[in-house]
Amino acid sequence: MKFGIIKERKTPPDRRVVFTPQELVRLQNEHPDAEVKVETSDIRVFKDEEYSDLGIAVATDISDCDVFFGVKEIPVDYLIPNKKYFFFSHTLKKQLHNRKLLQAILAKNIELYDHETIVDDKHRRLIGFGRYAGIVGAYNGFRAFGVKYDLYTLPKAERLHSKEDLIVRLKRLTLPNIKIVLTGHGKVGMGAKEMLDGMKMKEVSAADFLTKLYSQPVYTQIDVLDYNKRLDGQVLDNTDFYQNPTAYTSDFERFSKVADVFMAGHFHGNGSPDILTNPMLQAADCKIKVVADISCDVDGPIACTVKASTIAEPFFGYLPIEHKEVPYTHPGSIMVMSVDNLPCELPKDASEGFGEMFMEHVIPAFFNGDKDGILERAKMTTAGKLTPRFAYLQDYVDGN
């Protein structure tokens, strides 16, 4: 089995990589039959020499490999027919801008394994950069607060080296007694929580957050039944919400009346009610002035996320009364951070964590006959067709 680590070619450049030099050494030690090649790259966070110095082959041509590992979408012209590819294709939600990519993958008889489709037997995701999105997103939320109120200046995360460097900067801040509400208990939400706990911010219960005043900054981390309620008034459990999301409506307004900052790290499933609506933001008693939408669903459950912002220009203003983007200096605006590729700002940490997950959950499947079904579940295309699990994408492929 020959594995190839491809150069990232998407614009803007992504410096992350699936495997660090050390993880590839581990791969070869644990699986001596495996061959590994790294495509030369001038943008990767780890230099070519860091691989070659550890005995990893680095080459300009790695087309003789059987399986290719990348992070972001691959330009159609660089896809090699009859190979296996792992990368984030961003086609699972029928994203229009990537239709040609999926069409080309099928036409070239490529087996595609999207990182998002790598799940266990209960269909829980095993691979992702969510934790690092949460880490950088929370940091950027504090950057946004400092800019909006001209209180302090934090450097961009991409200029720092690690999560620990970010926390050191946050610990130096002198914050007013603000309240921060954080949604989500998955990898994204817990990544953001790591930052809040790392900077020693006090965590309080949702009930205390809503009713008590504090002389120091505090945060609360809330779950789906904290910010949604059944339309019929019943109080059931999370399972009921996930099974019957249309039976619920948002109850987030009680938090928007007391929170200064909203960090959105939730997963928003199909059919779930919008969370922070435009009427909530227009309300005279809405207190939220900074939204760090780490999940970044454009025109989705957070009304002020009217676009994805960029690492270069991470902040914009949202004017609720007109439901539109304005300069963040506008006195009536809410400051929004909605960068959709946050882990790119912490490429070394993100790559290290990603490689560890890949070594644990994916690589063994190549050598144990895929006994746990990891590869079989993840496979999106084979023999020029969509696999049954992803047959729902056929109309998207057909252009409908």
Image: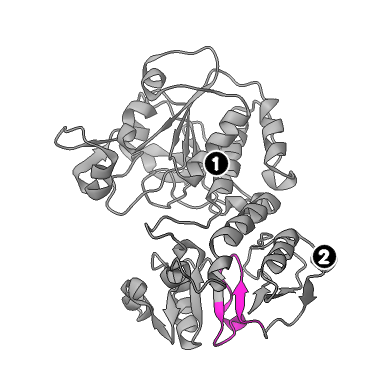
Which residue is at the front of the view, 35 or 131?
Answer: 35
Query: What quarter of the picture does the N terminus occupy?
Result: bottom right
Residue drawn at point x = 67 percent, y = 54 percent:
352
Query: What quarter of the picture does the C terminus occupy?
Result: bottom left
Q: Which label belongs to residue 261?
A: none
Q: Which label belongs to residue 191?
A: 1
**Which residue does the numbered mark 2 point to in the structure image?**
54
Q: What is the crowding at mark 1: few (fewer than 14 residues within 10 Å), some, or many (at least 20)?
A: many
Mark 1 or 2 closer to N-term?
A: 2
Which residue is at the front of the view, 143 or 147?
Answer: 143
**Residue 169 is drawn in which quadrant?**
top right
User: Can you see residue 135?
Assistant: yes
Is 270 placed left or right of 205 in the picture? left
Image: 215 above or below 327:
above
**Main SS type for the magenta part?**
loop
Identify the image's colour scheme: rainbow, by chain, secondary structure or one colour.
one colour
Q: Single out the mark in the foreground, 1 or 2.
A: 2
Q: Position of residue 320 (x, y in %)?
A: 39, 38
Is 87 placed left or right of 352 in the picture? left
User: Can you see residue 141?
Assistant: no
Which residue is at the front of the view, 61 or 42?
Answer: 61
Q: Position of residue 76 (x, y in %)?
A: 56, 80
Asked if the stretch drawn in magenta spans residue 28, the answer is no
- Look at the numbered disc 2 and give the secondary structure of its residue: loop
Q: What is the crowding at mark 2: few (fewer than 14 residues within 10 Å), some, or many (at least 20)?
A: few
Residue drawn at point x = 74 percent, y = 46 percent:
159
Q: Amino acid at mark 1?
A: Gly
Q: Position of residue 115 (x, y in %)?
A: 51, 64
Residue drawn at point x = 61 percent, y = 38 percent:
139
**Residue 13 is drawn in which quadrant?**
bottom right
The magenta segment is 65-84
Label 1 and label 2: CA atoms lie apart by 31 Å
